[in-house]
Image (tube, rainbow, N blue to C red):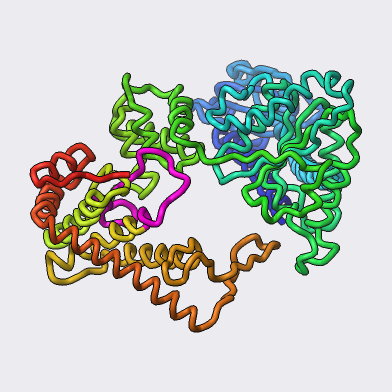
Amino acid sequence: MKPFAKNIFWAVVILVVVSAIFAEFAGNTEKIQKLTLSELSSKIEAGEVKKISVSGNSIEAVLKDDTKAETQKEGEAGLTQTLKNFGVSDERLRAVEISIMDESGSKIFLTTVLPLLIPILIMGVFLWFLFRQAKGGVNQAFSFGKSNMKLSNFKKDKTTFADVAGLKEAKEELIEVVDFLKNPKKFLDLGARIPRGILLFGPPGTGKTLLARAVAGEASVPFFSISASEFVEMFVGVGASRTRDAFAVAKKASPAIIFIDEIDAVGRQRGTGMGGGNDEREQTLNQILVELDGFDRDTQVIVIAATNRPDVLDPALLRPGRFDRHVILDLPDINDREDILKIHSKDKPLVPGIDFKKIAQRTAGFSGADLANLMNEAALMTARKNKKIIEEREILDSVEKVILGPERKSRTISAKEKEITAYHEGGHALVSASLEGSDPVHKISIISRGLAGGYTLKLPDEDRHLKSRAQFLNDLAMMLGGFVSEKLTFGDVTTGASNDLKEATALARKLVTKYGMSEKLGPVTFGNTEEMIFLGREMTTEKNYSEEIARQIDGEVSKFIHGAYETATKVLTANKKALEKIAETLIEKETIEKEEFEELLKPFKIKILTA
């Protein structure tokens, strides 16, 4: 009904516009007195008429008081003869100015022709809209099986490996693909077969699409992109038809690259018992497999697919001859993050001398997309402050905004709550600084961000891929530092530590059931996670141990928590004066940076022990 309603709307609009035009013409017309020929003759004889205009059979008279009157004469007779027949004398007739005018074509059109044309025009426009909509529906029906791939202009918007920071190993894997697209004869003469399908997988935001574009840019070939979800429709067979069309279009433009994003939308493992054998998703997957098998040895079309869930893909999709080249994209390390930050800052006005290494240290775990968002947030923050150049302070503040959310300075808290928050965050920071192997504290704040009433930002100085049992125990003690600080200072605890306790309990349970770090239970994992491949998410955890073991697991979790509690209590009891100083500074300034925090601890002879 939407197109029909749209047509009705425009028809009504046209009718209203035409009516307004006629109303304008009618409104501008002066009021004219209607007279008979005998009445006009009497007025002429009485000397009340100043001027007469004759247009066809229409007579318009201007009276002495400048009012207008009109009448009609006989078609066969002239005006003078007609007036004489009504008794007007020659003397009176000569006193009146008489002019003969040709009948106006526009007047005839407006008064006679246009009223007849208006209904015809309105119906014609209305029918034109209907036929155009019907034609569009027919065209859509014929194009229902088209792939709707997007073709990037590789000459205008060219992306190369220079635009992709980090990912050194991934780029090395793809260099030979670029070489094949540029010089296929070198490979074909040796009987080599370049991989038909390349699968890029890694966490979200690591640059899978950007890297695929860079391959096309380096090789200077057309880049066709489509999301796998665009293949699938509610009608069985449409996805397969679109797949055939996509590969046919790419073959005509070869050498070319087809990029299928989120391949897991159609490439999930078959035979899961959900959806049936006629499922549209499986039909589309089958067609993709057939198209990949249909490539000749010298076909210069490379299919690049991306996913962050390679574990759910169908084995047939990954076998040799299909997507047999797997390229892993990791989260960037500290050096890569520094390079990525520099790339995303090229088009932004920056204060000279910004330390990108320092920013990279604070962004451990950030993906390339996160870093791009970070620089954009810094630009937005600078604009809100009505500044023209981005400073390092805005970038560092944006790091915290991305991690924790925006500051909530307008949130009103009482002096007592502010004091409790200061001691809570001071407890976290002091425990972390006092334990050997802990990550250094970069910032402490009691300003609310997101859902947090305050926060202690501690980040490693270098990327870490392995973590020891001692480091986990330090993390547990640090998590409980706020809880213990509240209890020692005020003799009571608040709900502010609820999230700390939740995270500490979850970590303690992982130490026992996942990492095998319990001395009593030993190097054993407990619980088998079952996943629904079709849905691609964790559904249940199978309990593959007895009730007795379950009680021992709970006991070991409790042991880890109590050990961390005792460690935090020991540290904070021994350094109570330092805790008070940190809390007082937080109440006064609300925020303490790393350098100031280290200066606060020096008078108390606390040696910061970091990893």
Give the answer, above or below, for where 588 lies relative to 224.
below
432 left or right, relative to 112: left
Query: What secondary structure is the magenta-colored segment mainly?
Result: loop
Locate residue 516, reporting x and y percent: 48, 63
Q: Determine if residue 346 is in view.
A: yes
| Quarter of the image that includes the N terminus | bottom right
481 left or right, relative to 59: left
Could you say which quadrant of the image residue 325 lies in?
top right
106 left or right, relative to 190: left
Please name whichever residue, 317 or 559, is drawn nearer the observer in this view of the structure.
559
Report the magenta residues as a range: 445-472
Give the answer, above or below, for where 4 lies relative to 85.
below
Locate residue 187, reporting x and y percent: 83, 23
Locate residue 80, reporting x and y percent: 72, 22
Q: Residue at x 34, y 44 (%)?
A: 459
Locate residue 552, reporting x and y percent: 44, 78
Give the answer, above or below, for where 221 lies relative to 465.
above
Please name whichever residue, 174 or 346, is drawn nearer the observer in this view of the structure.
174
Q: Residue at x 36, y 53 (%)?
A: 471
| Magenta-span inclusion, residue 316 | no
Q: Determine if residue 134 is in view.
A: no
Q: Residue at x 41, y 33 (%)?
A: 375
